[in-house]
Image: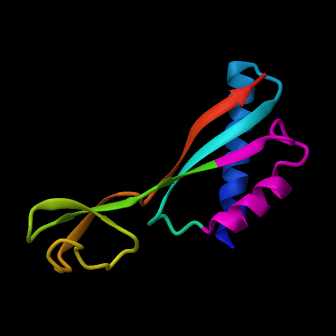
Amino acid sequence: MHEMAICESIRQILEEQAQTARFARVERVVLAIGALSGVEIEALRFGFDVVMRGSVAQDAKLEIEDVPGTAWCMVCAQTVEIAARYDACPRCGSYQLQVTGGDDMTIRELEVV
């Protein structure tokens, strides 16, 4: 379950930011997670609660924004939305797609005190 490792990385970022920006507690964390990122959302939610115990984000509320997967179709020269890697272009049916978005995860917003 790589989601636990992701949560550990988030915790480390939050702890470093708490020192740098001098805040005592994180009340809310907003993550933007791409449909093509390979992150299992429910496992991440569970891991977040477990990993954040004893940290500046111990009681933080986790919010997740879904980011759609997008790709450039080399045949019809259009940017299209896709649900999974190796999907066909929904416009022309071609498999000649280059992923252009929705394959990453970012910390979009923090609410701190």
What residue is shown at x 62% (from left), y 69% (from top)?
40
User: How many numbered marks, from 0 up?
Assistant: 0
- Percent from the top left, x then y, of residue 103? 42, 60
Q: Within the image, what quadrant is residue 15 found in?
A: top right
> Which quadrant is the N terminus positioned in?
bottom right
- 19 lies above or below 83: above
- 65 lies above or below 96: above
Magenta stretch: give its range: 40-63
- Percent from the top left, x then y, of residue 17? 68, 30
- Residue furthest toward the front? 91
Left or right of residue 57, residue 89 in this image:
left
Left or right of residue 24, residue 101 in this image:
left
What residue is shown at x 9% (from left), y 67% (from top)?
76
- Residue furthest toward the right? 54
- 54 lies above or below 101: above
**Observer-nearest of 9 and 27:** 27
- Percent from the top left, x then y, of residue 49? 82, 54
